Amino acid sequence: MHPEKTERFRAAHREEIGPRYDGRVHFAVLNLVLPSVIVGSLASVAAPSLRELAIVPVAFVIANLAEYLGHRYPMHRAMWPLERLCHRHAGMHHRFFTHRAMRADSHRDWAAVLFPPVLLLFFLGAIATPIGVALFVFSSSNTGFLFVATAAAYFLLYEWLHLAYHQPDDSFVGRRAIVRVLRRHHMTHHDPARMTRVNFNITFPICDFVFGTNASTHSVVDEGQAEPAGPMGEPVSETGDTVATP
């Protein structure tokens, strides 16, 4: 059973989800749009050189860094003009799912996990595409298309893994070894007392290790002294609810 306050928040949030929302359709659209971008980009690549292929691991690292910085800062700090992103993630996602209540109870709960289409357009249209165009102009068309394909593949992997972490532990997906390992990393981040301090990578905790915010090694704060903190540093209860202060 989930904690009572979490259940109350979930019930209230579910009332806000449109009656026609279907998480399976949402997920299917992602798995139609993003692979189309990947296939279309790769189909435009012709006889790439090794130098051009080198953009693939570089793009992967850039995507991991973008995931880390985007999650650590605008998704947990109300930064203009992305305040709504912080509200959706820290104010909604982290109250819907805590370290004591990680699983989605139905596909309608996927609305609290998957990015809405507007954010898909933002990440691909406002970030990946301009970088791809710059590489197209200043490097080569192959480099630009390979970057866009890698960025789209990373975004799709992000959505797959994040959704997997919020499936039941005993489900087919939840029992996969890699999901169990990465879920533990993500579940620690969903502890309200630690969510603004550790484990910001959703896919692979590369930048968490680089920047010292992996929960197993980080030294940002003394965890024994740390107070639970909300997205703006305000105190929260162990269930994730903001505590009023004088």
Image (spheres, rainbow, N blue to C red):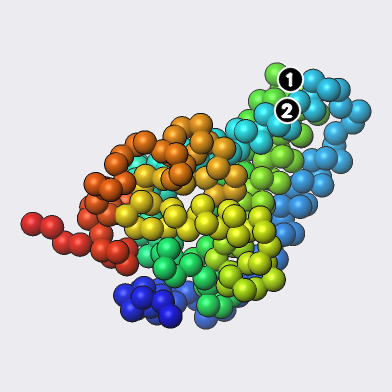
Image spot of residue 168 (x, y percent): 58, 72
Real-space Cα distance between discs 2 and 1? 11 Å
The answer to whether 38 is drawn above or below residue 56 in the figure is: below
Residue, far left? 246
Relative image position of residue 205 (x, y in whole percent): 55, 42
Identify the residue at image location x=24%, y=46%: 225
Rendered residue at 44%/45% (across/down): 215
Q: Is residue 202 above or below residue 95?
A: above
Residue 159 makes an appearance in the image: no
Q: Check disc 2 and report the residue beneath it.
A: 55
Question: Which one is nearer the viewer's eye here, 232 or 21?
Answer: 232
Q: Considering the numbered disc 2 on the image, is that residue within a helix, a strand or a loop?
A: helix
Occupied quadrant, residue 136: top right
Where residue 139 is drawn, which disc sits there?
A: 1
Vertical placement of residue 121 versus 5, above or below: above
Q: Earlier in the sequence, mark 2 or mark 1?
A: 2
Type of the residue with mark 2: Ile
Q: State the quadrant of the C terminus.
A: bottom left
Structural crowding at the residue carrying mark 1, measured as other residues with C-alpha within 10 Å and reported as few (<14), some (14–19) or many (≥20): few
